[in-house]
Amino acid sequence: MKEHSSAPAGDESIALLRRSAEPLPDLASAEFAALFDRYADARVVLIGEASHGTSEFYRSRAAITRRLIEKHGFNIVAVEADWPDAAQIDQQVRRQQPPTWHQHAFQRFPTWMWRNREVAGFCEWLTAYNRGLPAERRVEFRGLDVYSLGASIGAVLAYLDRTDPPAAQAARQRYDCLEPWQDAPTLYGRNVLHGQQSCEDAVVEQLRALLERRLERLGRNGEALFDATQNARVVQAAEQYYRTMYHGSTASWNLRDQHMFDTLERLLEHRGPGARAVVWAHNSHIGNAAATAMGWAGEFNIGELCRSAWGREAVLIGMGTDRGEVVAASNWDEPAQIKRVRPSRSDSWEQVFVQVGLPATLTDWRGDTRAELREALSATLLERAIGVIYRPETERQSHYFEAVLAEQFDAWIWLEETHAVTALGRQEPHLGEDETWPFGE
């Protein structure tokens, strides 16, 4: 770990960053997306975000992804979302079915993270794009995450009910162990910690049964069986996750990100030769964890695993902002609000880019000719991370961590002032009375 620097950067480094930062055109222009043609040679492009509730982050990712799909043949969009929920979007964009996911998917907290107008707009575009392609060439929309215990159990059983009722009955018997906990899986983990028998053997046995089924039926009805098998993998990973979370955050974090990476690998393998993916996830997942306080504490993430697996063929792009608005809650399972994002701390990477003085930029330090730029970004400074919770009153403790930007990412999108996403549905977030800082008391 490098020694923490209290001052963001000297005048020479700021001048270098100002020369190196490429001003970003308007998001809606073709010139914006064209700047990302430089990543056309990658197998996987991972695009981060500094929060889960910022419109410009979603719209930037959508514009970059459209370009990579249209001009460079990327054919998988894999996101930090649950597999069964993302499958409902996949039914729209790839199977050309009516978009029912607005009503039926992403119903658990945090609903706004994927059920928002920015995502819906991208899905409309992808549906239209896929319409002009044969089914086998259409772009997939997939979920990588691990939280869908109940929905994934339901998807496995629904598949087996359609294809093999006796196997469905056997699966029900195996999953009966988890049935009481499907709506409150954290209680399952707590009860196992206090001596209740775990369901590990049962879910492993069910996954093994589906894997054997895939081998027997290789090449026949592959898509439906692939989906069911992945849902069984989610059940297995979720059972482990909720059982592990009471043993410490590091173990559960690593299990989750390993599952996301494994899912991405399977998607690429399932797609076959020519598979190329764009990943949408938080900076904390897609930046190389080994260059952050997370990694120094023993955590790894999907970005680090991708870099280890594919080297230069994996591109890690972070995003940051100084101030503006974000949709977030104050505590888990509480209503979302539009909260004001405080200007960044003086000892943060965000403040470095404020000093650069350009409101919207792309800074890219990949390649052999960027050694001086990488050196300028090699200090250890604070970086802000806002997830679905934002607590500005404890921002230093709750939302900042140390990072070496040059090693964490390959490039950085800077959007100095940003705005909240627009949630779908009748109950949209409102500006909270306690979040009017610095304009209110």
Image (cartoon, helix red, strand yellow):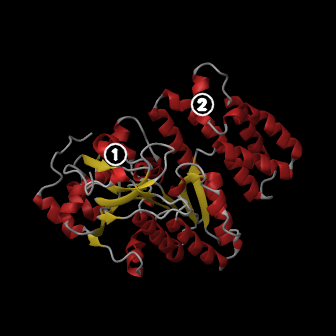
Q: Residue at x 79, y 39 (%)?
A: 171
Question: CA gap, disc 2 to disc 1?
Answer: 27 Å
Q: Is residue 303 left or right of residue 174?
A: left
Give x and y (percent) for residue 343: 25, 56
Amino acid type, mark 2: Leu
Q: Residue at x 66, y 77 (%)?
A: 131
Q: Pick whichever, 52 or 308, lies toward us.
A: 52
Q: Quadrant of the N terminus?
A: top left
Residue positioned most to the top:
195
Query: In the rendered image, which residue does mark 1 sit on?
Result: 399
Give x and y (percent) for residue 213: 79, 46
Q: Is residue 230 left or right of residue 279?
A: right
Query: In the rendered image, which residue does mark 2 sit on?
Result: 187
Q: Pick whichever, 274 or 252, lies toward us.
A: 252
Q: Is residue 95 left or right of residue 141?
A: right
Identify whether 156 is placed above or below 17: above
Give x and y (percent) for residue 116: 52, 63
Crowd tier of the residue under label 2, counting other residues whose Cα lies within 10 Å: few below 14, some 14–19, many 20 or above: some
Crowd tier of the residue under label 1, counting other residues whose Cα lies within 10 Å: few below 14, some 14–19, many 20 or above: some
Whether residue 355 is visible to the viewer of this picture, yes or no, is yes
Residue 20, image quadrant: bottom left
